[in-house]
Image: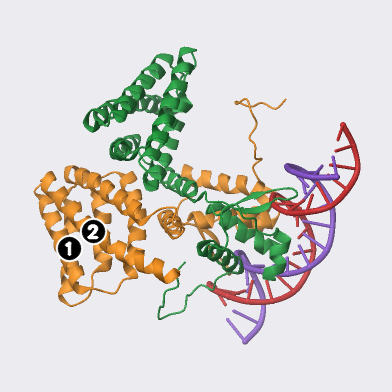
Chain colours: A orange, B green, C red, D purple
Amino acid sequence: MVESETLFKPIKVRRAFEEISAEIKRQIFKGILKPGDKLPSEVELARQFNVARQTVREALRILELSGFITIQKGPDGGPIISDTISSSISNSLLDAILLRSISLDELTTARLEIEKVVLNYAIENAVDEDIERLRDNVLRARKKVASNIVASTENVEFHRLLAKASKNLVFVIVVESIMTVVADFLSRLQPDLEKSWQVVEAHEEILEELIRRRKEVSIALLEKHLLEVKSRLQEIYDKLIQEQD
Amino acid sequence: MVESETLFKPIKVRRAFEEISAEIKRQIFKGILKPGDKLPSEVELARQFNVARQTVREALRILELSGFITIQKGPDGGPIISDTISSSISNSLLDAILLRSISLDELTTARLEIEKVVLNYAIENAVDEDIERLRDNVLRARKKVASNIVASTENVEFHRLLAKASKNLVFVIVVESIMTVVADFLSRLQPDLEKSWQVVEAHEEILEELIRRRKEVSIALLEKHLLEVKSRLQEIYDKLIQEQD
DNA sequence: TCACATTTGTCCGTATGTATC
DNA sequence: AGATACATACGGACAAATGTG
C-alpha cells in the first residue's frame, strides 16, 4: 500500500519531463535559481536526473515556453534563468483572442475595470518617485508627438507605470499582460498622429488629477480615455477578422 | 500568429519544432482543425512533416502546454484538439504570482477588489443556469457542514462560479489563478467547522442578494466576507512565518 | 480474464549546426 | 581559422499504458 494523503490516486501519472520541469520551477520559486543563473547543459542535466537527453529536452521546452528560461547555443551556452513570464501570458492571451475564446470586448472591459481599481490604489500609494516617472513619461511622449512621431511606446508605458504606482504586484502582472496584447493590436494600426496626441493629452489630464489626489475626477477621465481606446481597438479587430476570412 | 512585414529578418532562425507547432496552430486558427478533432499519431506526423519523431514530440509539448491539444495514450489515442486555452493562461498567471513572491496582503487586496468588480458584472449578466449552479453549490456546502465536514472545495468553487457568471473569460482566468493560491493557503489551516459554517452563511447571503439583483448590498456583503477571510489568512501566515524561524 | 494491437513515454547512439574562444 | 561545447535533429529500440476482441 502506497501512502497517500487523498483517497484516490491521480488519474494521470506524471511524466518524467513534467517532474523535471516542476523540480526546476521549484528551485526558481525558492530563489535558489535566480534570473541570469546558468543551468547545466542537457547532457549534464540528463546525468543528474538520471534520464535520457530527450526527456530533459521536453522539460526544457516547457520551461522555455513558460518564460522561465531562454536557451543559448554554442560553448558556454545552455539554459539560462530569465523571468519573461508576463510576455508568455500575453502570447497565450493573444492566442485566445485569435481563437475567439476571448472576445476583444471581454478583454477591453476587463482592462477598463481593473485599471479603474488600479488608479484608485495608485492615487493612494504613489510615492514621489512614481509621480516623477509618470511626469517624465508624458513629457517624453509630448516631445515625440511635437516632432511628429507617434508615441506608442510611451503611451503603453504610462499604464504600466500606473500599475507600479499602485504598489500591488498582482495588479502589475495583470495590467502588464493585458497591455502587451493591447500594444500588439495597436502596432497593427496606421500611425495616427492626431490620435496619439489625444492620448498624450488624456494621460496628462489623468496624471494631473492623480497628483492632486482627486480620485473621482481622475478615474472618470481614465474611464473616458479607455472607452475611446476600446472603440478604436474594435475597429482594428473587425478589420483583422475580415482579412482572415 | 499574423505575419507582419518588418525590415529585418528575425535574428533567431526558427527551429523545426517551432515551425511544426506554428503550422498546426495555423490550422486551428483557420478552423480546419476544430476541438474534438484527432491529429495523426506521432509517427504519422513525423512522416508527413518529414522530421524525426522527437521533433514532433517537442512541437506537441508546446501545443499541449498552450492548451491547444491534449494527449491520450493507447489505441485510438493520440493528440486531440481541445480548447483548454484559458486554463493554461491561468496556470501561467499562477506561475507569475508565485514567482514574484507576492505578499499575502497584495494578493488578498487584489482579490477583494477584483471580485467586487466581478460580482458587479455577475449580477448584471448571470443567467438562470449560473444561479442554479450557485444555489447547488451552497446547498452542497450546507449539507457538508451540517454533517460536520468542512466544505473547503465548495467554498472555493463558489467564487469560481461567480466569476463564470460575469460572462467575462478574462475575469474567470484572473480569479482562477488567485483562488488557486488562496486555496493553497487555506489548505494549510486546521479544519474549523465554525468558520466553515460562517463562510457558507456569507455565501448564501451574497447569493440571495445577487438573485434580487441588489448590487450595493451584495457587494457590501462580499467585501465584509472577504475582509474576514483576509484577516484569517493573515493569522495563518504569521504563524507559518513564526514556525519557520 | 487474457492476449493483442496501437500509441505515447523513454532510452541510447550518432550526426550536424552553431556560437564562442 | 580551427577547436570546443553546446543545442538541434535523426534513427532505432523497448517499456508502459490503454482500449478491443
The subunit letter for the residue under badge 2 reads: A
Which badge, 2 or 1, comes first in the chain's sequence? Answer: 1
Residue visible at 16% across and 50% down in the picture: A128
Q: Nearer the viewer, residue B77 or B175?
A: B77
Any part of residue B18 in sight: yes
Q: Give how far across and how far down residue A203 sits, in percent.
A: 17, 59
Any part of residue B231 in sight: no
Vertical comparison of D18 with A130: above or below: above
- Apparent side of residue A179 relative to residue C11 in the rendered image (left or right): left
Residue type, numbered disc 1: Val
Find residue A158 and name its label.
Answer: 2
Q: Give how far across and how far down residue A12 sits, in percent.
A: 65, 40
Q: Give how far across and how far down residue A109 sits, in percent.
A: 29, 50
Residue visible at 42% across and 23% down in the picture: B138
Identify the residue under disc 1. A138
Residue type, numbered disc 2: Phe
Q: Give how far across and how far down residue A68 sits, in percent.
A: 49, 54
Q: Nearer the viewer, residue B53 or B207?
A: B207
Whether the residues at callouts 2 and 1 have beta carbons within 8 Å, the answer is yes
Circle 1 residues within 10 Å: few <14, some 14–19, many ≥20: many
Circle 2 residues within 10 Å: few <14, some 14–19, many ≥20: many
Q: Are marks 2 and 1 on the same chain?
A: yes
- Apparent side of residue B61 relative to residue B45 in the rendered image (left or right): left
Vertical comparison of B121 with A66: above or below: above
Q: CA distance from mark 2 to mark 1?
A: 8 Å
Element type at mark 2: helix
Quadrant of the rendered structure where residue A133 is?
A: bottom left
Q: Residue furthest front?
A: B128
Q: Nearer the viewer, residue A213 or B202?
A: B202
